[in-house]
Image (cartoon, helix red, strand yellow):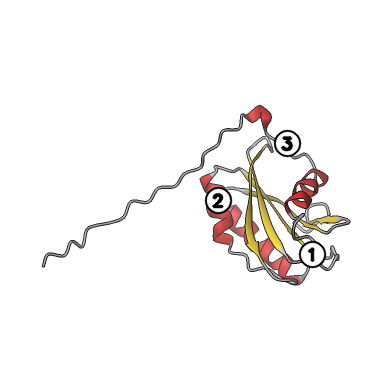
Amino acid sequence: MKIDYFTIPEITVSYKDTVKNSERAVVTCSADVAKIFTEACKGCMDHHEEVYALFLNRANRVLGISNIAKGGFSSSVIDIRIILQTALIVSASAIMLSHNHPSGSIKPSKQDLDITKQVQKGCEAIGIQLLDHVIVTSETYTSFADSGLL
């Protein structure tokens, strides 16, 4: 029996983008981001927590949005590597994070603050900016950037 120890699977990574730059949404402030993330969380807003990342180019035009995690009523498990991997695949220059609070509270928890700092450090390591983390509820939102938490 012959065993080939040098058979290695090929890894391919792809991102298909058919949107013209001029047709992309532009993010100019936290209210723009809150609208996008409120729409993304529409189906889960008051039921369970979901985490999204918005990926932007240098001109703050939206490259895409990705659901990073789905959780329970009070928390979600976020793997920073998934956020950074997606950012690299789409050649993002910046990231904005968001999650909903089914409780209706817009106050960031200690876990919210901790994960934001961890994502920020990861972004810095690969030359990508974390511009904001927005907590949305069915009635309002809060921006880490606007609150001086970034």
The residue at the point 60 percent across, 53 percent down is 124
On the rendered structure, is 71 left or right of 79? right
Q: Are marks 1 and 3 in contact (CB under 8 Å)?
A: no
The disc labelled 1 sits on which kind of residue?
A: His
Q: Are marks 1 and 2 in contact (CB under 8 Å)?
A: no
Give the number of the mark in front: 1 or 2: 1
Question: Looking at the picture, how far across and down is residue 88, in whole percent?
Answer: 53, 48
Give the number of the mark in front: 1 or 3: 1
Question: In the rendered view of the protein, which quadrant contains the N terminus?
Answer: bottom left
Residue at mark 1? 101
Residue at mark 3? 26
Residue at mark 2? 86
The disc labelled 2 sits on which kind of residue?
A: Thr
The residue at the point 55 percent across, 58 percent down is 82
On the rendered structure, is 31 left or right of 114? right
Question: Looking at the picture, how far across and down is residue 29, in whole percent?
Answer: 80, 43
On the rendered structure, is 86 left or right of 146? left
Q: Are marks 3 and 2 in contact (CB under 8 Å)?
A: no
Question: Looking at the picture, how far across and down is residue 140, in whole percent?
Answer: 87, 55
On the rendered structure, is 8 left or right of 130? left
Determine whether 65 is above or below 114 in the image.
above
CA separation in Å, label 1 and label 2: 24 Å
